[in-house]
Image: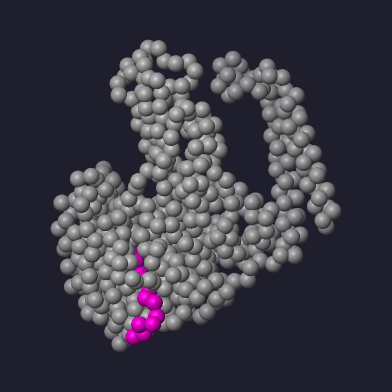
Amino acid sequence: ADARITSALISLSNTHRSVRAERGKRAPTDSCALPALSARIFLPHPPPCCHLRRKRRRLSMALLRLAVFAAVLAAGMHLGLRQSAPAETGIEADRDPGELTCELGDVGPAAVDRFVGLLRFPTVSSLLPAHADTHVAPERADSFASMLEYLKGSYTDAYNVMELEMVGAGSLTTLLTWRGSDPALLPALFISHYDVVPVSNGTEGDWLHGPFSGARADGDIWARGTLDIKFGVAGLLEAAGVLARRGFRPQRTLCFAFGHDEEVGGSLGAAEAAKLLSSRGVEFEIIVDEGGLIFKDGVRPLTRTPVALVGLSEKVYTTVEVNLTAKGGHSSMPPTDGSDIASQTSRLLAYVAQHPLSATLREPMLSFFHALAPHAPYAVMRALMAHAHVWPLRQLLAKVFVAAGPQTAATVRTTTAVTYISAGVADNVLPQSGVLRFNCRSHPYDSRDDLLAYFESALRAAKCSGATARVHEATHFGQTPSVADSGGPHFAALKRAIQETWRIDGKGVVVAPMLMTGGTDSKHYAGITRNGVLRFVPYMLNSTAGDMARIHGTNERVAEADFLRGICTYTRILELMSGPM
């Protein structure tokens, strides 16, 4: 087998050299090799020979890719026979633990009513400079104040067994503590937030029901915040109330932190709460925050089985600011050597677009493939995913994820997005300086120094003389998160709670770890948790039907049944995590 694999790889190398040699034989004046723009200018209708040559080249490259895939697959399968995939611990994803009855009784309708009442408060946070003191606009201050009073008056069963502190700027962030019976156990923290993003101006009429109406129609609850993420605030308080009414007392202290400015970075809410807890010497056993959810249609094309994705970490938010310099001058005499700000900018943007940071599979995405492998629709996919840790397949799957689209690509490589460009003072003056900002989301294992090194290399390649790159201060920083252990008892407890309380068409749910590409308030608590953060919200969406667009979008809504099922899931999570783990 080794000899066959070696022979296949040598054959591939020879084929690759042949294709490159054929390319090199083309004369520089070959009309088929002209850049697209030149071809359109000088050859509006390329001769037939060009089409034939292009078809041959495309066929050659397609055959080369097919041969590479076959060789890598053969090598991966061969190595996979020798290297078994890491064994999963805890409850196996394809084992049904048995459904736990979700009985809320008369509490169900009342819980929905309370949730609807919470949704009617337009608690929109703001990052405008004029609102920098609290991240709340003056016209929204009453909404936040009334909402906080509503929580205390509506969720009395939960508030009565907990200690309440209002922290952060303006005392707008809620910190609740349910004291456990065993002080030797480290506490657990459950995070959510009650601020929401605004409704885009001019789109209010596109909502089938008002964005802050809390309307109940077609089995759904409609309002901004149903999905992101007053669902978590209401669900956790309902779950604590359910347990309190049963006379339950946790062994482990359970803390709840509800932020007021998560949507604008959390620097005046969660960050301040985390500083306060850190000053008291508090360390958490585990933290549970928002993040993953349940996909009814699975994760296509890897599986069509319903999947609950749990974020074990999140990408690190960094904004890199690049400062360009030039001689400037009169706009009637622009330089011809490409030293002007516009030329430098175009070369830099082209380089970054054409040379993205490399893609690779690392935890938690390796565990993601291992968890889904038994549920893939085809045997070859199951084999590939089960051996995703083997080197050739590891690189191949990373490339597949990049090619599949922006959402999957973001899970396997650092992304760079231009979010700000500024230059110039007048129409007739060539700029002497320019500023570009790149918002980057990197894996927790990658350092910001590595990111700066990439941009410094890009500036050299783009011939931006005198340019500098630096990390731009941003409110979203927080601390670099760790990657929680998918084989640990905390993930196992969350997995058990999900699988015991969710059934979709009579079948259980696969639970798989993931890397979150967005940020949450948990980044501010990253330095005070011993076992990291688990990110999950117990509601269900259908990505094939376009449900993901409802998050921060028009007609945001959640199914009533999901909200009630979510209360049961949160209740079970609190139970399982309240004792020794």
The vertical placement of 113 against 434, above or below, is below
Q: Residue at x 39, y 80 (%)?
A: 185
Quarter of the N terminus within the rendering: bottom right
Left or right position of 205 against 497: left
> Which quadrant of the structure image shows residue 54?
top right
Determine if residue 230 is in view. no
Pinpoint residue 121: horizontal percent, then vertical percent.
21, 60
Which stretch did the figure color magenta?
181-193
> Which quadrant of the structure image shows residue 436?
top left
Pinpoint residue 51: horizontal percent, then vertical percent.
68, 26
The vertical placement of 58 against 439, above or below, is above
Pinpoint residue 158: horizontal percent, then vertical percent.
26, 77
The vertical placement of 229 against 489, above or below, is above
Q: Residue at x 64, y 55 (%)?
A: 394
| Residue furthest to the top | 332
Q: Is residue 348 magenta?
A: no
> Which quadrant of the structure image shows residue 391?
bottom right
